[in-house]
Amino acid sequence: MQFTLPFYSFLVFKANLNRICEMIEDEVASIHEAHIYLKKFYSKKRRCNFSREVIDALFLQKSQYYHSPTIMELAYSPKIACQISVNLHTARSLYEYSFGKRDPSLEILGVRFSTDDKSEDAIRELAYYRGTELIRMVRVMKDPKWDLCLLGEQQPFEEGKCYEKIKGKRIKDYFTLEDLIRFATNWGAPIGQDDFWASDQKMYCWGYLENDTLKSDADLADWEEWPQDLPFD
């Protein structure tokens, strides 16, 4: 499969969508209490049929990598693996560590990767959590030079990969996008398959931004229009 966005950031849960949506709704309430402006676009009970092209078009339109004041998220169960759930977001989710607090046994895989190694913020990262405990993280990142970071004990999904430095081998090649896709698949998230990015079940879509990012009524109107093209039944 061909990844077309400049950057992907998402969480994968070994839990069904109903459980994840319950956690999201609890967290949404907490955000309201913290006086952060939030707009929930659709009920989690709505059904839709969508594919990776729909996701790419929507997020490419609005995503500004880490610099966007607006965070927009989708939660769905992939066609190819309906026993797991995906939380896709345009920036790092505010909920990343909250899910584990609500369920200490929940297994979470945090995935971040850019598709252009020449970009200033190029990165490839897998972070495996059980509850709030970080079990394993593998990351290569340009900051400003490429750096390799390994935390926790190596896991079976890494296939015994050796990360020892070898003379003449570039740091970014110690953990390639192909490695990331393969390891995520071994964990239970086949992100390299088109049907991972498609669903014919219910989907939860929402977005939020902080009050001080609203510069005008036009900004808010533009932001609220974002999900209208979603193919809901």
Image: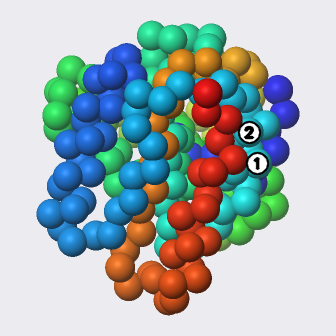
* Residue 94 seen anywhere in this rendered image of the structure: yes
* Rendered residue at 84%/33% (across/down): 2
For the point 51% across and 84% down, the residue is: 217
Give the secondary structure at mark 2.
Answer: helix
- Determine whether, in the image, residue 210 is placed left or right of residue 196: left
Question: Residue beneath label 2, please?
Answer: 54
Q: Which of 111/203 is in front?
A: 203
Image point (24%, 60%), residue name: 31
Q: Which mark is residue 57?
A: 1
Residue 152: image quadrant is top left
Q: Is residue 59 above or below residue 119?
A: above
Question: Where, quadrant-wise, is the N terminus in this rendering?
Answer: top right
Amino acid found under the numbered disc labelled 2: Val
Q: Position of residue 47 (x, y in %)?
A: 53, 25
Q: What percent of the width, then of the height, locates residue 159?
A: 58, 13
Q: Position of residue 165 (x, y in %)?
A: 64, 40
Q: Give the quadrant of the C terminus.
A: top right
| Residue found at the far right of this picture | 2
Q: CA distance from mark 2 to mark 1?
A: 5 Å
